[in-house]
Image (tube, grey):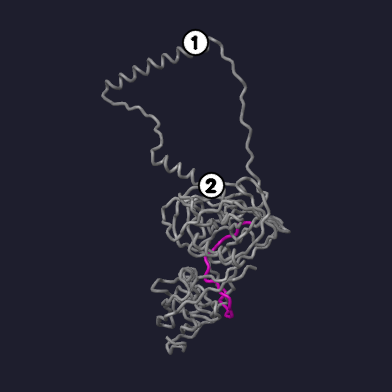
Amino acid sequence: MTAEPDSSQTPSPPLPDTALVGGPATEPSTQAPTEQPWQEMGESVEDVTTPVPPVDVPADDAATNGHAPSGQPRAAQAPPYRGRPTWRSPLAGIAALVAAALLIIGGMAIGRATATGGTSVKSVATSAPSASAQDLQQSVISVIHIVQPSVVEVTSRGAQGGAIGSGEILRADGYIVTNNHVVAGFSTYTVTLATGQTVPAQLVGAAPQDDLAVLRVQLTNLRPISIGVSRTVQVGQFAIAMGSPLGLQQSATLGIVSALDRQATEAQSGPFLAGLIQTSAPINPGNSGGALVDLQGRLIGIPTLGAENPESGVPAGGIGFAIPSDRVKFVADQLIKYGRVVTSGQGFLGIQGQDVTPELATAFKLPAQSGVLITGFANDATGASPAAKAGLLRGDIVVAIDGKQVATEADLASALLAQTPGTPVTITVQRGAKQQSAKVTLGERPAKQAG
C-alpha cells in the first residue's frame, strides 16, 4: 500500500488527545509509597502531537506494586497461656478407672451386636503422607534452603520516606537485581543478607521501562542465584516465591505457574510490561524484586505485581505477575556493563494510538467498534517510524497483526514487544469502509535511560 490517501477513505474524525507514556514517576511522601492500581495500556512512544476525544475508558485490569513502607509493624505474639495447676483426690482417680473399664466392656458389646446385625465395621486410622507427597515436600524444603542465601531485603530511603522490597544476588562480587519501583525516588539504599548482616548499597543503573534496577554492595564471596530459562517454563509447574513481604525477611510461598505472556501496566504513568509470568504463589507488598524459582532452585522470574480487583480495589489472592528471567538477564547484563539499557531488543511499530471503544466509534462515526486508532507517529531507535514508512495513515484503525485480532493498545503492544527488531509483520487496518493490509518491518523500541 502507498502513503497516499485512499479515494474511498472516510473523513477523519477530530482525533483524540493522547498522553505520553513513560516510566513510573512516584513522588516520595512522609510515608512509604503505597500500592497503586494497575491497568492495561498500550505501546510506549515518544512523539505525540494529536489530540484525543475526552472519552473515559474504564481500565480492564488493575494491580499493585509490591513494596511496603519501612517500619512496617510486625505481628505481636501473645505469651503462651499457663493455667493454674489442678489437684485430684485418690477417689477421683479410682472413679476414672472404673469408668474406663465400663467403656471398654460396652464397646465390645456394641461391636458384637453390630457384627451380628450383618454390618461390617472398618477401623479408621490416619495414614502417613504418600511417598510422592513426601518427595515434593522435601524438594520444596531443599530449594528454599539452597535459594535463601541468594535472596536479600532491599531498604530504600529518601528525604520524605522509604520503602522495603526484595532482591537477589546476581554475582559473587556484590551485584543485586531488584524492581525499579523499589528504588525509584530514593537516594540511599541498604541490603540485608540472609545472615542478617545489613550493608550499604549503591545504585548501578535502572531501567524504568522494564521496572528493573541493579544495586551493588562492597562484598565478595556472595552466593549468586542460579538463573533459569524462562522461555521453557510451562503452565502448571510448581513455583516458589521468596522475599520480604511486609518486611518479613526470608519468607517463602508455594504455587504454580498459572499462565504465560501476560501484560500489565502500573497505574497511568507506569511502564507497559509484556510477557509476564502469572503465578498463584502469593505475592504481597515487599515481595517486589524477589525471586520466583522452580523446584530446581533456578530463577524463572522476579515477582513484580499483585493483581487487584478494579471495581473494589481489593487485592485478588492467587494472582501475581513476575518479569521472566530471560528479560531480567538481558536488561541486568546491560545495567552492570553500561549503567543503562543500550538496546531494548524489542520490536517497535512507531505509532501513537488510542483504543477504539463503541462509545468512541459512535461519537466520531468510526468504521470499527474496536482496534487502535492511529493518531500520530513515533520514531524508533534509528529516528524513523516503521509504520509511516510502510504507508499507514493517520486515521487508520489497526485491527489485526499477522492475522491475530487487535482490540486494544495492550493487545498491539504485547504482540510487538514479543518480536525482535527487523521482524516483518502484516498489519491490517480499517481505512474507511475497506480493510487493507501492509507489510511492516519492525524497528527497535527506544531504550529510555534511567531518570
Q: Quadrant of residue 449?
A: bottom right
Location of residue 137 in the rendering, given as x and y in whole percent from the top left corner: 45, 42
Name the spot of residue 57 as percent of width and height, x first.
53, 69
Q: Nearer the viewer, residue 77 or 58?
A: 77
Select label 1 or label 2 by which is in front: 2
Tell me which amino acid carries mark 1.
Ile
Residue 38 on image: x %, y %: 56, 61
The location of residue 395, given as percent across then percent down, is 49, 81
Along the line of sight, which residue is nearer the eye, 80 or 192? 192
Dot 2: within a 10 Å radius of its alpha carbon, few (fewer than 14), some, or many (20 or more) residues?
many
Q: Is residue 210 above or below residue 70?
A: below
The mark nearer the N terminus, 1 or 2, is: 1
Taking the view exactly as shown, the residue that stands out farthest to the right is 159
Residue of label 1:
94
Our reading of the magenta stretch's main secondary structure is: loop
Q: Which amino acid type is shown beneath numbered disc 2? A: Ala
Quarter containing the C terminus: bottom right
Q: Are marks 1 and 2 in contact (CB under 8 Å)?
A: no
Please check the rendered image and state whether residue 42 is part of the magenta-colored stretch, yes or no. yes
Q: Image point 45% across, 14% down: which residue?
A: 99
Boundaries of the magenta span: 34-54
Q: Secondary structure at mark 1?
A: helix
Residue for badge 2 = 252
* Viewer-proximal residue among 370 and 30: 30
Q: Quadrant of residue 45?
A: bottom right
Identity of the residue drawn at 49% across and 10% down = 94
Q: Residue at x 37, y 19 (%)?
A: 107
